[in-house]
């Protein structure tokens, strides 16, 4: 699966140098409102994921300062068409024009067809479903090769936007952002700063 570099490490640059003109910042949305404190069958997880996809973020969250700063420096801000992505961008830059693009939605998470006596938390189902999807189970949804093509197109789009010197912020989703990042590296971009994998996490990319 995609990592931030060939060795799975992030090269850190001094915070004062980031982002420079023409940087790309990939950010994950804030914490969703839907509770994960349940145990579900595979079929129930499919329904839970559908609600997750449709829902927004938990009220009362305070965006981290580094991401607010990145939004302030961004010339262009993009979100996916999912509500949790849109509400996160609104929390970061409510007075800015934000472009919504289906190109940035998360890769699907269809659970494998396991029997109902297996009940897991949404977090565990997410891991199991992601591995299953990566290995070929798609349940009639977007396949891994299709998502990889979409990520490649998204990376190329961001590459072209940033080529003119514009700073671009994408507020989207954890795994698909990682897929985009892998393709940005193939285009010559370098991840110079990363801030974890949780909600509100960010990856900063620059050209050498």
Image (cartoon, helix red, strand yellow):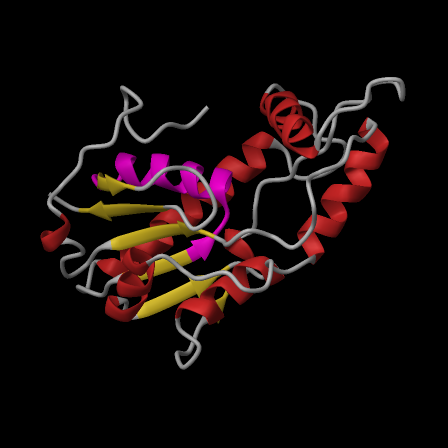
Residue at the farthest bottom position:
95
Residue 174 colored in magenta in the image: yes
Residue appearing at x 34%, y 60% in the figure: 169
Residue appearing at x 44%, y 62% in the figure: 62
**Residue 21 percent across, percent down from the top left:** 15, 61
Q: Nearer the viewer, residue 135 or 50?
A: 50
Q: Quadrant of the C terminus?
A: top left
Residue appearing at x 36%, y 57% in the figure: 64
Q: Main secondary structure of the magenta part?
A: helix
141 lies left or right of 186: right
Q: Which residues are magenta?
A: 171-189
**Residue 13 percent across, percent down from the top left:** 13, 41
58 lies left or right of 176: right
Residue 123 colored in magenta in the image: no
Q: Nearer the viewer, residue 137 or 160?
A: 137
**Residue 116 percent across, percent down from the top left:** 89, 22
- Within the image, what quadrant is residue 76 found in? bottom left
């Amino acid at each position: 699966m995609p990592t931030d570099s060939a060795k799975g490490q992030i090269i850190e640059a001094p915070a004062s140098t980031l982002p420079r003109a023409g940087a790309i910042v990939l950010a994950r949305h804030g914490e969703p409102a839907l509770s994960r404190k349940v145990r579900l069958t595979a079929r129930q997880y499919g329904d839970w994921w559908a609600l997750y996809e449709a829902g927004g973020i938990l009220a009362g969250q305070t965006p981290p300062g580094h991401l607010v700063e990145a939004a302030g420096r961004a010339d262009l801000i993009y979100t996916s068409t999912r509500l949790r992505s849109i509400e996160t961008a609104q929390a970061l830059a409510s007075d800015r024009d934000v472009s919504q693009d289906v190109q940035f939605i998360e890769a699907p998470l269809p659970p494998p067809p396991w029997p109902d006596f297996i009940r897991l938390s949404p977090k565990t189902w997410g891991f199991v479903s992601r591995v299953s999807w990566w290995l070929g189970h798609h349940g009639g949804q977007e396949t891994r090769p299709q998502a990889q093509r979409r990520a490649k197109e998204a990376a190329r789009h961001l590459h072209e936007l940033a080529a003119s010197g514009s700073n671009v912020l994408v507020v989207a989703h954890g795994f698909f952002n990682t897929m985009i990042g892998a393709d940005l590296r193939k285009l010559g971009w370098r991840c110079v700063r990363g801030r974890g994998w949780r909600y509100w996490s960010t990856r900063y990319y620059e050209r050498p």
